[in-house]
Image (cartoon, rainbow, N blue to C red):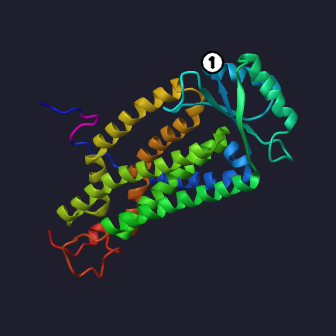
């Protein structure tokens, strides 16, 4: 019984043939993506701008669409409405969370505006009552942003440490550059398209870090095996061989991941669309970087050819054609 393969068994694609375009273009896009937020700015959501969260409770079922339509004439700016589920709620306890962005110059929405929101919602459902009103100021939002940056940075360093311990420092650096590439390009497209950037996107970025690492490790693991197996083969050819041997698995994993993500992107609704878009884009860039970015770094740095040798005086600097180990 033959297994499904997306590429032929003996595929021999030279992934370094147009490295100036693939790798060079990627590095240029990374630089632009890092600079872009400082020039054009991110379209921050309530989590980072500050605002007010209103918790409502009603007898009738929550109708998010009706709530949003009722609040639209008030021109409140950024409004996020979610239904809250809890096993402890009774059948007549229907709870919703409404987040409204802060008004410029205020840490919370004015009392008069709060009453307008309540009146608009009562027109939809007279049983609605506000059980809590909480505000988050810009100072707290700034702290959230700092913690988000630290979380992503910490994840990337953890990735480097893991790869370094499992392989060599050249692989660790290649994996780190690939991960930074994926995160930076995701932030860059959010700047370009001005998609709302909130805490859910930070969660998506951390997910992308994990996915990028998984894809890169598969290629690196095969490369390590082939470096030991083909001691006299030039490093470039070994890395190409490894990428070709894992290409079917890479495309199968990415394709099967993208199918539900695209379905959620189309049918999931506005609430999760930004989060799903970030992960979808991250899967695409993660697949690309594992083939065209990570191993380019390894090729430039060179690697040790025989992990069984105790003499590693040339480790980290020895390229394929100059290997001293005998095949």
- Counting from the top left corner in percent of width and height, residue 48 is at 69, 48
- Counting from the top left corner in percent of width and height, residue 51 is at 74, 43
Residue in front for this viewpoint, 285 or 272: 272
Q: Label 1, on which residue?
A: 60
Main SS, magenta residues: loop
- Quadrant in the picture for residue 144: bottom right
Question: Over which residues does the magenta segment extend?
Answer: 5-9
In the rendered image, the vertical position of residue 190 relative to residue 235, given as above or below: above
- Counting from the top left corner in percent of width and height, residue 307 is at 22, 71
Seen at 63% across and 53% down, the residue is 32
Q: Is residue 254 visible?
A: yes
In the rendered image, the vertical position of residue 100 relative to residue 297, given as above or below: above
Seen at 51% across and 56% down, the residue is 180
Q: Is residue 103 left or right of residue 100?
A: right
Q: Is residue 8 left or right of residue 127?
A: left
Q: Is residue 313 left or right of residue 54?
A: left
Q: Dot 1: few (<14), some (14–19), or many (≥20) neighbours within 10 Å?
A: some
Q: Is residue 299 left or right of residue 120?
A: left
- Counting from the top left corner in percent of width and height, residue 131 is at 69, 34
Residue 60 covered by magenta stretch: no
Residue in front for this viewpoint, 45 or 62: 62
Residue in front for this viewpoint, 90 or 216: 90
Seen at 42% across and 51% down, the residue is 210
Name the image quarter holding the N terminus: top left
In the rendered image, the vertical position of residue 307 relative to residue 59, given as above or below: below
Residue in front for this viewpoint, 80 or 181: 80
- Quadrant in the picture for residue 146: bottom right
- Quadrant in the picture for residue 300: bottom left
């Amino acid at each position: 019984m033959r297994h499904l393969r997306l590429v032929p068994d003996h595929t021999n694609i030279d992934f370094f043939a147009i490295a100036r375009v693939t790798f060079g273009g990627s590095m240029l896009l990374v630089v632009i993506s890092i600079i872009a937020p400082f020039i054009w700015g991110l379209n921050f959501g309530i989590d980072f701008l500050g605002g007010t969260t209103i918790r409502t409770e009603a007898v009738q079922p929550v109708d998010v669409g009706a709530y949003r339509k009722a609040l639209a004439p008030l021109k409140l700016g950024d409004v996020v409405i979610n239904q809250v589920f809890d096993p402890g709620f009774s059948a007549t306890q229907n709870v919703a969370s409404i987040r409204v962005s802060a008004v410029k110059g205020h840490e919370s929405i004015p009392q008069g505006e709060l009453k307008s929101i309540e009146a608009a919602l009562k027109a939809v459902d007279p049983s609605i009552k506000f059980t809590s009103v909480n505000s988050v100021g810009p100072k707290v939002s700034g702290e959230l942003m700092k913690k988000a940056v630290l979380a992503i940075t910490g994840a990337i360093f953890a990735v480097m440490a893991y790869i370094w311990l499992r392989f060599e420092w050249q692989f660790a650096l290649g994996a780190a550059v690939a991960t930074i590439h994926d995160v930076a390009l995701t932030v860059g497209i959010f700047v370009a398209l001005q998609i709302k950037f909130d805490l859910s996107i930070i969660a998506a970025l951390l997910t992308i870090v994990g996915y990028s690492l998984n894809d890169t490790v598969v290629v690196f693991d095969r490369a390590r095996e082939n470096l030991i197996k083909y001691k006299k083969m030039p490093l470039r050819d070994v890395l190409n061989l490894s990428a070709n041997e894992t290409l079917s698995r890479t495309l199968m994993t990415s394709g099967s991941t993208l199918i539900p993500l695209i379905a959620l992107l189309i049918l999931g609704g506005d609430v999760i669309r930004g989060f799903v878009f970030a992960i979808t884009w991250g899967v695409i860039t993660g697949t690309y970087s594992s083939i065209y970015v990570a191993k380019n770094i390894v090729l430039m740095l060179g690697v040790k050819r025989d992990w069984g040798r105790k003499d590693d005086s040339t480790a980290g600097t020895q390229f394929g054609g100059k290997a001293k180990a005998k095949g």
